Amino acid sequence: MRWILSLAVVGGFIGFIVYLNTLETDGNATSVTEQKPTVSQPAKPAPDADGDTAREQPKFKFYDMLPESEVVPPNVEEYAPSPDTQNFRYLVQAGSFRTEEDAERQRAQIAFQGLRASVSRADVEEGSTWYRVNVGPFDSRSQMNSAVDKLVAINIQPLVRKIPKE
């Protein structure tokens, strides 16, 4: 029953399309391509007594205000801390695992990216042991950012820590 009803609906739709194509168009109707849009031209100013056209006055005040309100920034030296003045280094923690095998597996994955990683053991108060995978330490922020970019490229979300210099 559904097939017959759906065939009747499709047939009726096709018949309606054929009927619309056979209708004659009215001769008075104009196509879209024949219509030309009308554009209103701005009125030209009347010539002055000298024969010159009148100059248009600025409509907005900011044309006058902008040249008068120029701001000159003060000369300030750019801040760039040297590694000698920093009393810390950057350490990037790439992961923390309960088993040493998992930590070594991630350390090897990081080594393929050209970074030196180390595994350190951390004993927690509750008596459990965690193995942290650390990359670094780095003396400059740019070196640390380069390492973080490489870790993010292999889907590792690192944790950046500042450690005191020894």
Image (spheres, helix red, strand yellow):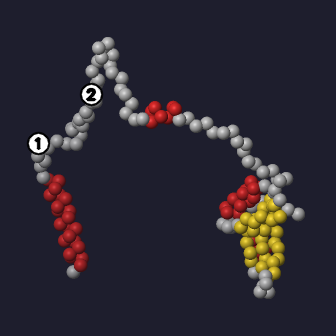
Q: Which mark is residue 96?
A: none
Residue 124 position within the rendered picture, expressed as x and y whole percent measured from the top left: 79, 82
Q: Is residue 114 above or below residue 80?
A: below
- Quadrant occupied by the N terminus: bottom left
Residue at the far top: name it.
50
- Quadrant occupied by the C terminus: bottom right
Q: Which residue is mark 1?
A: 28
Q: Give the residue at x 13% y 47%.
A: 25
Residue type for callout 2: Ala
In the depicted view, which residue is nearer to us: 85 or 102? 85
- Label 1, residues with CA under 10 Å away: few <14, some 14-19, many ≥20: few
Can the viewer see residue 150?
Answer: no
Q: Is residue 41 above or below residue 94?
A: above
Relative to 153, 54 lies left or right = left
- Under tag 1, what secondary structure? loop
Residue 40 position within the rendered picture, expressed as x and y whole percent measured from the top left: 25, 33
CA gap, disc 2 to disc 1? 34 Å
Q: For residue 104, what is the image quadrant? A: bottom right
Q: Which residue is mark 2?
A: 43
Residue 24 position within the rendered picture, expressed as x and y whole percent measured from the top left: 12, 49
In the depicted view, which residue is nearer to us: 59 or 110? 59
Residue type for callout 1: Asn
Q: Give the residue at x 53% y 35%.
A: 69
